[in-house]
Image: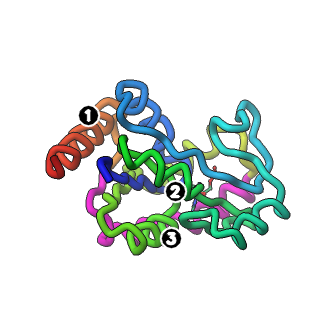
Amino acid sequence: MKGVLFVISGPSGVGKGTLVKAVLSKREDIKLSVSCTTRAPREGEVDGREYYFISREEFLSRIRENDFLEYDEHFGNFYGTPRSYVERQLKNNSVVLEIDVIGALNSKKLMPDAVLIMIAPPSLEELKKRLLGRGTETEETVKNRLERVQYELDQQHLYDYVIVNDDLKEAEHRLMQIIDSEIDKRK
Ligand code: 5GP
């Protein structure tokens, strides 16, 4: 295996998607693994870009076929990392998974060399503002999501790195530094 598996997590709304996109747009040698989900697409989301949107039946059948490196259920929907894509890419490239804390810890068990990076919000208040500002979430969904945030942040000590996303440019710079140094270490 030539590449490094980077697993990036952080509460919903923390900006991890934006950060990951910024880094990947500059690096041909790092591939994003697009997860499968049974949740409905949000406005603007495209099948195969944000997620592969698949039915519950298909998801369950793929679980039985051991097609997921890891999977988890959030708010009644399944989310999973396609195993074959990740394994194939790692032969030549590094791979980024953008997944939740439980999925990240499960991936590390399966692939102990994985590098776990948590993106944390400057504060819970700030995160709440960002989630409501998105306009795609109801008050109720935001409340459910915030309840999960504390749990996720409490797992920080299990991560290799924590980046506080206070300033997007600085956070991007830090993420790039971490990625470069981890790739260098294994050369
Ligand atoms: P959202 O519905 O906001 O896109 O994602 C909800 C949660 O699912 C987020 O915490 C996100 O990181 C997580 N997630 C996305 N893809 C995967 C995956 O493949 N596996 C796991 N375990 N979690 C995922």
Where's residue 32, x and y in %? 48, 41
For mark 2, give the secondary structure. Answer: loop
Left or right position of 174 against 141:
left
- Dot 1 or dot 2: first in sequence order is 2
- Characterize the magenta stretch by its predominant secondary structure: helix
Range of residues picked out in magenta? 139-163
Which residue is label 2 attached to? 99
- Residue at the image position 35 percent from the left and 29 percent from the top: 27
Which residue is label 3 attached to? 102
Where's residue 105, x and y in %? 43, 70
Q: Are marks 3 and 2 in contact (CB under 8 Å)?
A: no
Q: Amino acid at mark 2?
A: Ile
Viewer-proximal residue, 67 or 145?
67
Viewer-proximal residue, 137 or 52?
52
Occupied quadrant, residue 179: top left
Q: Which mark is residue 86?
A: none
Label 3 near ligand 1 (CB < 8 Å): yes
- Residue at the image position 41 percent from the left and 51 percent from the top: 121
Dot 2 crowding, Cα within 10 Å, few <14, some 14–19, many 20+: many
For mark 3, give the secondary structure. Answer: helix
Left or right position of 36 against 13:
right
Occupied quadrant, residue 168: top left
Q: CA distance from mark 1 to mark 2?
A: 21 Å
Dot 1 crowding, Cα within 10 Å, few <14, some 14–19, many 20+: few
